[in-house]
Every structure is written in structure tokens, then in C-alpha cells.
Amino acid sequence: MTNAAHATALTKVYGSGDTRVTALDSVDVEIETGRFTAIMGPSGSGKSTLMHCLAGLDFISDGRVWIGDVELSGLSDKNLTKLRRDAVGFVFQAFNLVPTLTALENITLPLDIAGRKPDQAWLDTVIDTVGLRDRLKHRPSELSGGQQQRVACARALASRPTIVFADEPTGNLDSRSGAEVLGFLRRSVDEFGQTIVMVTHDPGAASYADRVLFLADGRIVDEMHGPTADLVLERMKAFEAGRS
Amino acid sequence: MLRAALRSLLQHKLRLSLTLLAVVVGVAFVAGTYIFTDSLKRSFDALFSAPQPDVSISVDTGFNQQGGGGGGGGAAAGDQAATLPQSLVATVSKVSGVAAAYGVVSADGALVIGKDGKVVGQNGPPARGSTYVADTAISAIALASGSAPVGPDQVVLLESTATSAGVSIGDSVRIDTPGGTVRPIVVGLATRGISGSDGSTLALFDLPTAQKLMLRKADVVTGVVVRADPGVSQDSLKATLTPLLPANARALTGTQRSADIADRLSTAFQFINVFLLTFAFIALFVAIFLIFNTFSMLVAQRTRELALLRAVGASRAQVRRSVLAEATVLGLIAAVLGVLGGIGVSQGLRLLLRGFGADLPSGPLVIEPRTIVVSLVVGVLVTLVSAYVPARRAAIVPPVAAMRDEITLPNRSLIVRTVSGSVLLLLAFLLARVALSTLDDGTRAAQLAGLSALCALIAVIALAPMLGRGALFVMGWPFSGSAIGRLARENGRRNPRRTAATSSALAIGLALMTTIGVIASSTKASVADVIDTTIGADFVVFGAKFQPFSPDVYRSVKDTAGTSAVTYVRQIPIKVGTEQSVLTGVETDVFPRVVDLTMQSGTISGIGLGQVVVDDKTAATLKLKVGDTVPATFVNGASSLVLKGVYTQAGPYTGWITSIPTLMSIGARELDSAVYVKVAPAGDVGAVRVSLDAALADTPTVKLQDQASLKDQINGQFDRVFGFIYALLALAVIVAFLGIVNTLALSVHERRREVGLLRAVGTSRPQIRRMVVLEAVLISLFGAAIGVALGLVYGSLLQKVLEPQGITKLAVPGGQILWFLALSVVGGVVAALWPAFTASRLDVLKAIASE
């Protein structure tokens, strides 16, 4: 099995001296291609930092990170930007869409920025999968929270990236909308072979993944394959108990 | 609450500093204007501390100081020296209480020729030839070095005149006077109490020399100055002398004369002050838009903070007061800085005026308490007024907004603005139509046009948000192919009020510039048209400083081979009723061949002694018709003239025209104001030019001009005036661009999440920069476009209103307007540099991290 992304001895340190905080402590991680990986952990465990470092949004303090076979450390801002544009898709918790652009324009934004023509057949597939055909001309302010996140998902997929990073994609949604978005992410893995990494603290969300990585105090402390919400919750409770 | 206000000021200091700058620029202009005029006034105080005659006697001509009204094609207005018999000096000397009395001569027309062979001094200010009065107790002019002039071969020059001429004591200097060219030795240099030079020159002779050169008569003077015996008051001496004077003379005490001069200066300063302040207030008005925008955005960004204040119990009034307190502090700081900046501005104004040809006397910097008070009041008031609406809006933020995650102030409907803007626009249109139908009444038409312009300006400001959405959509179309272009366009359109306020500021500046541009080019086109259609002569000779010149010039060119007509004109001031004008003497048989004169009634050819023709406007004003007898007064007396014809006022000459013999019978000096030369149909223009140049080679006091150079010269004068106005308006435009910088900087800050998102999904830094720059260009181009449109409409309307004043041709300065638009684009780019840089450097993670 190949890796869509991997990191070795990934370390991220904020500040220096007395205020020095080690967010990631020599993390080794592999993200397998075509699978849905969830990263879980309590607040402050470093799960968002890990995602940002893997995605090339943040600079690392030590170690090495690859997306596909491109190593991120050493890339200039220009090349990093290009990599994010062409090889990475993002779904954030909020502020995912540009308010001045329509849903369709938001979906094709990374392609438009790159000056590339979208693959119309693929675009249609993505749009139909997220079920937004009749909402394409709407501005984000005219869409519900769930619809907005589905637009964000469609954008993340539109350029057929090597990997999609989703940062608490359902954090701001009611359970029904959240289930729709997660269902869609699951389908994109199953039907299109997309690689997805999702950061979440919701065991229910994690249960959609193929594999769950547990993070605590900047280290990967456990891993679970074929998770269910109950199993994940149990494991999380165990950590909490172990910590206190 | 005050503490909260101050703290928020400090937090936003970077963003506020640009707002501050706008107020500072405006206030500095106001303060600078006052400091400039006060200092100028003070520098003239030396005039009043200088010694002066206890009583001075001069001719009361009843004419304004400036002499006659409109001249011919820029030529000198009529000139005539008013004189008194010299015997008056002896009469006055014998009066008891008079310690000494001196006959003096002071007249225009002593042109000092510099070492470079050119006339010293500038066009406009007089080149005076006077007597030197050695009595230091009463002479305002003091010898700085050398000795008093004695005899026909000695002269004393004003220090500044000598410097410009490049001569010093012991040198011989050429001076062309009404009495001919002389080359006396400079024996002394004089000062008149104030430094600097107003462009005038002064040559001082002894009395007989001055009489001979300036008046060409030995037995007359232009005035008598008197020193009183010790203990004799000026007033009592004046009372004693007055009964002895001829009917046309009057006596003034030294105190009265000082008061007169002070009065005249004060009027002049008042004019300069108001003129400059107008531009200062235009800049301040533009600054209001900037401040308004800044406070609006700061309030929008602080909604949560304000809501929190409300939630913990602050009342609406307290929130409002806190925003207004911020504005007050800001206004005060800006005003204080503005006063300091005013010192710089006053020096800048001096330099600017010097650049445009006025070398002003320098003196100590005067900062009156009034200057500081006015600046502080203006600074604070302008800031408060601009912050009032944002403050009100801040007060209506509901406390619950503190709990909400996303903050959006509702985009209020534009209906009220659109409707009231449309109504005002209609009103502006109607007023303009009324103005066009009342063109006969110039003042009324001008008032209506001004009112219409004001309505249109407010209408455009009100309509700008509505117009802006459409305009930016269209203007952004060429860029809509790329995602960046679309984003820039939509960013400009998303907050129409903000874009509109930013653009409006620029629009005001450019509307004024364009109006001035249209008037400037129309004026030039009209002048060119007048010259083309009414001057039949191929060459005209004018005084180098548009002063009258010796008839020798005419004599030296009148027999030039290849010419078909050579003629001269002379002018003197004339007053009919209360209408002061010019009486031009012409050779009635030749003149119509060189200057087109369309007679409406009567005729000019062969008019005899005491007969005149007049232009149709003057005839209408005075209700005169051919055959009427016109009682006229002159500098040296009165006379009755018979009206023989009325001509259409179109060409270079307006007012009264008569024959040379009539003019001389009234007592004109034998000096010409212009000589016209027409080349014969078979003649060679080039050859004639060569002959004329040769004939005038040794006469630097006159300038030979063909029609093209005449146009150039007149246009050059207009260019200087309009250039000065442009320079002053530029300040308002600069403030407007500061507004663009500020709006963009605040917008970028407001949209930092969005920028972060764009960066995250792969937008490069150059693309972010391009997006911000493009938005700035669209905003400034929109402002420039509506400004230029307004300026074109009102420039054209103003031209129509000014048509009776001689601006008969409408000319749109197309090239210049393209320049305005191009410079607006450049200005937009420059204004966007800093915000664009900031945007491209935003930390992606910080920008997208939820709070």
C-alpha cells in the first residue's frame, strides 16, 4: 500500500525559553492512499497542528513531511502554495467559502486560480454526489450551514487532489447535516478512491473513518482500524482516565 | 467609558494613523494658509515703521489705482500720468508750519535693461521711475549704500532691481524711459524697508531728470511731499494746506496714507486668505469621507466588543459617546499635528507662489492664537461630524451580538439614497436649464449653475453606491476571465457604500480638476479664436512688460518693405458715469485693416475731433445711441465726446475708440501701447519678420509677436494661473488617495479570514496582491470616471455662463482627461501597494483559525 502522505520524526515547537510548548513530539505517521483516516484527541493534543503540518499550512520545527513523493520541508512559499493548490483539498470547520463567489465558483476556485479548465464530467459527478445541482448559482449567505460544508467538500474534490484534509468539518453542523457531510466524505473514498484525513473530537464522526489515530500530548498514542462510535468513545474515555 | 475609548484608539493606532494623516493634511492647509498670510502681513509692517511724509499732496484722479479696465490683447491698460504744476511746491513751502516741501515724480515706464540685454522685472508689476527725496525724516526709501543721484547722468536703483540687472555702484545701466533711452551711472542702492521683491523695479533720479524722463515736461510734478515743523500736527498742517490746492489735488496725512495702504493690503490679504482657504476646505471635505469610512469600518469590526459593553450594562448613549470620544481625541491630535504641519505648508505656499512668479517678502513666521484656535476647532469638528453616523450605528448594536459567532451588520437598503439622489439629480438638471436660460444675467446664471453643481455633486455621492455596483461590474469585465479578477471586482462591489464613499472623495477632486481643465482649454481656444478672427495683422509689437513704449518703435518699422499696413494705438483711462474703461486712440483709416471691427451702427472711418465709437455692451449699459453726447472724465480733466458708432465687442479691444488727434487733445502721453504690422498680399512674411527683427534689435523694451507667439504668450499666462489652481487641488486628490489606502487596509483586515482561505486553497502571494491592487484600481477609476463626467458637464455649463466674459468656445481637453484617468489608475496602484503587501503576508493559519 502506498502513502498519500507521511511524516517522520515530525516535531513542532511554539515559542522559546519559558514559553516553549512542544505541540508535536517526534511524530511518525503514514496516511494510506485511498483510505479515510481520522485523527482524534482531546483539546490541545496537537491534532490540528499535525494536520496543518501535513498539509503544508504550517512550518515544522524538525523532522520530514511528504505529500505523495514531494517533500515539504525546503519548499518555498511559492511552491508550497502551488502544491496546496494542485495536490491538496481543504475542508475547514467554518469560513470555508468566499462570500462573493457563487457555490459553483467556490467549487472551481482552486482550478480557476490555477487557470485550469475543470474536467466537466468529474465536476458533474462531484456536484451530483453532494446534491447541489440546484444551488450552484447561490451565494454562500443563501445556503444553509450543511450546504456550505457540502460546497466546501465539492471544492476539495474538484481538482482531484492527492489528499483532502478536513478540519472538524461537522463541528458547526447539526447532527443531520453532519451525517450528510460525513456520508459524502465516505462515499468519495469508497467510490472515487479519494484519500481523506479528518481531524475531529466527535467519536460519531470518527466512526465513518477506516482508521483512527489517537493523539495525546503531541504523540500518537494509539490506532484503531474499523472503528465504531462506541469503541472510539471507550478508547477516548480510557485516555482521559489515564491522563488524570 | 473614556478609558475604553482611549484603549481602543491605541489598539487601532496603525489603522487610525492614516485617518489622522487626512485630518492633519486638511488642518495643516488651513493653519498654513493663516500662518502664510499673517506672516506676509507682518513682513509688510516694515512699510509702516519706515519714515514717511507728514503730508503728501497728489492728484485725485477718481480712477482706481490699477488704471483702466480691459486692455487690448493683453496690452497695457491706458496710462496717463496725472500732474500738478511745480509752482505748487513753492506755494506750499511758504506756508507756516511747513519745514520742507519737495516736488516728486513717480510714474510707470522706467524700464531697466539688465546686463543680459533683457528688461528687468516681471510682467504686471510696475517699472517705476521716481525722484529720490534726500530728506531721510520723511523718505520711505532709504539709501543702503552710495549717494543720492544728482544730474542727468546719475541714478539710484532699488537693491533688488540692481541685483536682477547685474549692476552695482559705478556701473552704467541702460534705462528706457518715456523720455528716451539713457545710460546713467548707478551711484547708490536703495531699500524700502521690506525684503524680497514683488517683481516691480524702481529707478530714482533727481527731480529735473525725473521730470524730463518720466513726464517729458519740466514744470510739472506728480506730487508734493511735506515735512512739518516740530510741534505742528499732521492734521492741522493738512487743514492749512488744503485751501491752497488746485481742485484736482488732495492732501493726505502720513497717518491717513498708512491707513490707506494698510487697507489695500488687508483687502489683498483677505482675498489670498479666502482663496487658499477654499482649497483647504475642499481637502477637508474630502477628508470627511475618509474619516467616515474609517470609523464605519472600525465600528463594524468592533461590533462584538461594543455588544459586550452593552451586555455588561453600557447604555446606548455611552457607546455612542465612547466612539465620539475617540473621534475627539483623534481630532485633537490631528489638529495639533496640523498646526505644526501648517508651518511647513506656509513655507510650501511661499515656494509655490515663487514658482508661479511672485517673489514675496520674507519675514518672521507669525502664528496668531486665532490660527491655533481655528485649526483645533476645524480639526475636531470635521472628525466629530464624520464620526457621528458611525457612532450612532455603533450604539444600535444589540447586546446579543456579543454571543453570536459571525458578525454581519445588515446591508441596509439603498432605496432612500437612490430616491433622494435621483430627486437631487433632477433638481440639478432643472437648475442647469434655468441657468442656461438666464445667461444674460451673468451673476444669476453663475449662482444657478453653482447651485446646480452642488446638487449634482450631492446627488452623485448619494447615487454612488447604486452606480458603483453596476459600474464596477462593467469596468471589471475585462478582468472577469480570471478568478483573481472576479474576486477583485466582487470585493469592490460587496460593500457599495464603502466603495462609494472612497470613490466619491476622489470624484470631488477630479470633478474640480476637470471643470478647471475645461475652462482652461476653452479660455485658450477662445483667445486663439479671437486672435484668428479679429486680428488681421501678421505681427504685433507690445511692450516687453505690456507697458507703453516710445513712438520711435513705430517710426522704425513703419516703412518696412513688403508691408501693406503699419499702425499704432495709444490708450488712456476714461470714466463715463461710474464706468471706468479705456479710451483707445487709433489711426482710423488704417486700424480697421489690422483689427476687425464690426460696426453695428455708425462708422469709425473719418471720425473727427471729439468723436468716439464704443462697444455694444457699454452702449447698452449706458443706454447710448449714435449721435449722443457723452460726458467723460480723464485723469487730467473732463471732456464731452460725441458717439459716432457702436461696434460688436469681439476682438482684443473693448471700450471707447477714437482718433489719435482726439486722444492727444485730451493730454495723453506720447506713448504707444501696440504697433500692428500687416504684410502685403504679395509680401514675404519671412522677409518682413527679418526686417522687423533688425529694426527692433536694440529695443529690448518691446516684443515682436506673430499670431502664434501671441497665442502662446497669452496661453502661457493662463497656464500659470490654472497650474497654480491644479497644484492646490492636488492636495484634495492626495487626501482622496489616502482614503483608498485606508479603505483597502481596513478591508484587508476585515477579510483576513477570506484571504487566509484563498491562500490555503492555493492562491499565491502575487495573486493576492494583484487582487487588492485591481480592487483599488477599480475603485479609483470609478471615482475618477464620475468625477470627470461631473467636471465635463459643469465645465461646459460654466463655459456657457462665462460666454459673455469672452469664453466663447467650448474646448474639451481630451488628452488631459485621459491623463487624469491614467493617473488615477497609477494612483490606485500606488495606494494599494501597502494594503496588498499586508494582505499577501497574512499568516494563513492565523487568518483561518477560529477565534
Image: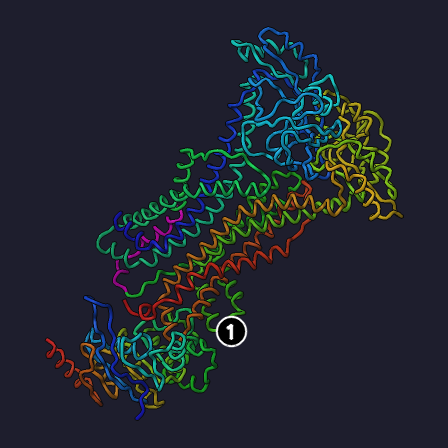
Task: Give the residue displayed 37% in from the left and 68% down from the top.
Answer: B754
Q: Report the residue that reaches farthest toward the right.
A: B682
Q: Quadrant of residue B141?
A: top right
Residue B472's place in the image compared with B739, above or below, is: below
> In x, y percent, where is residue B776?
47, 61
Q: Is the image coloured rainbow, by chain, by secondary structure, or in one colour? A: rainbow
Please state if A18 lies on the left or on the right of B461 as rendered.
left
Label 1 SS: loop
Q: Which amino acid does label 1 sit on?
A: Gly
Q: Which residue is drawn at 69% across and 44% down?
A: B713
Res B423 seen here = no
Secondary structure, magenta segment, majority class: helix
Q: In x, y percent, where is residue A185?
A: 31, 84
Q: Looking at the image, can residue B508 be seen?
A: yes
Q: Which of B86 and B460 is in front in this view?
A: B86
Q: Where is B266 relative to B523, above or below?
A: above
Q: Is A216 part of what is drawn in magenta?
A: no
Q: Residue B45, relative to residue B350: is it above or below?
A: above
The residue beneath circle 1 is B481
Magenta stretch, residue numbers: B385-404
Percent x, y of residue B315: 26, 50
- The N terminus of chain A is located in which quarter? bottom left
